[in-house]
Image: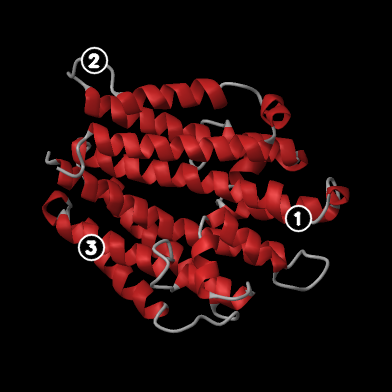
Amino acid sequence: MLGKTAGGLFWMYRYLERAENTARLIEAGQRIALTRLEAGDAEWTSILQSAGVKGAFDLEYDAVTRDAAVDWMLRAKANPSSVLSCIESARENARMVRTALTGEVWNATNAAYIKIREKLARKVSERDLPEVLREIRQHTSLVRGMTHGTMLRNEIYDFVRLGTFLERADNTARILDVKYYVLLPSVSAVGTSLDNVQWETILRAVSARGGFRMEYGPGGGPAEITEFLTLNKRMPRSLAFCVDKLRSNLRYLHRGVEGQLPSLAMLDHLERQYLSHDIAAVFERGLHQFIEEILDQLGRIARQIEIDFRFFQ
C-alpha cells in the first residue's frame, strides 16, 4: 500500500473519532457545569484546555463564555479540531482513499458529512445542544459500524484501527483530566455527593456507566472509575484496551519484516512504564502528571507511525 493511502485512512478515522470525542467532551462539560455550586462560565476554560484548543481560542475571543466555547468546539472553521472541521477533513481523506473503502463505508461517511454540516450550519442553542451532540455520535458510530461490518481484515483495516485507537486513547485521557485535575471545585469536595455526581458524568461521557456497574457493582468510587478507564483491558475506551489494540494492528502490519518497528517498541515501553501497575501506583504518581505523560507518549507514537509507514511519500 502507498504511504499516502495509508496516511489517508489513518487520518480519516482519527478525524471521525475526534469529531465524536469532541462532542463527548462538550457533553461532559455541560453535565459537570450543572453540578457547579455557583453559576458561571469558568468551567469552559477547563474544557478548552483539556481539548488542547485554548490557545487558538484566545486568539479569537477576549473572554471565555459557555456560548463561545461550545461554538468554537462545534463549528469554528479556524479551529481544526472542531466537530465541523473534523468531519470535513474525514470526508476529504475518505474521498482521497475512496478505492480502499467499501461502498457502505463511503456512503455512511458522506451521509455523516452532509447531516452534521447541516446541523452545524448555524449556532446551536442550549436547548438543541443535547440532540445535536447525540446525532454527531450516532453518525460517526454508523461509519464505524459499516467499517466493522463490511471491510476486509487486511492492512487497510489495520491503518483504520491505528487511527481510531490512537485518537480514542487520547480522548479518554483528556476526559479524565477534565474531572480530576481541572473541574473539581475544591479539595473539600472530594468524596462528597458533588464529587460522586461528577465522576458519574465522566462515565457517561465515555459510554462506560453500564459496563462499570457490571464490573464493580453499585459501590465503585473514584479509584475504581479511574482504574476502569485506564487499566481495564475489557473496557473498549480504556487506555489499556486502546494500547493493546494498537499493538495488535502494528504487529499485523509488521509481519514478515525484519527488525523492530520503532513505533511498536514505543508502544511496548508505554505499556510497561504506565499501564502495568495497579491504580494505587497511578495515584501515587499523580493522576494529572500520569495523564500528561500518556498524552505526550501517544503524540510521539503517532508521529513515529507516520515515519515508519512513510505517510508523506
Q: Secondary structure at mark 2?
A: loop
From the image, tell me which residue sits under label 3.
92
The quarter of the image holding the C terminus is: top left
Assess whether mark 1 and mark 3 are in contact (beta carbons under 8 angstroms): no
Q: Is residue 295 left or right of residue 98?
A: right
153 relative position to 226: left or right: left
Give the residue number, with chain letter if any, for mark 1: 197
Residue sitting at the far top:
259
- Which amino acid, by three-letter code, is at mark 2? Gly
Q: Of tags 3 and 1, which is closer to the observer?
A: 3
Query: Mark 2 packing: few (<14 Cα in 10 Å), some, or many (20+)?
Result: few
Write the residue at 56% across / 64% down: 26
Q: Which residue is mark 2?
A: 259
Q: Amino acid at mark 3?
A: Glu
Query: How dense is the environment of label 3, judged by Cα within 10 Å: few (below 14), some, or many (20 and up)?
Result: some
Rounded to the nearest whole Å, what is the CA distance between mark 2 and mark 1?
Answer: 49 Å
Q: CA distance from mark 3 to mark 1?
A: 40 Å
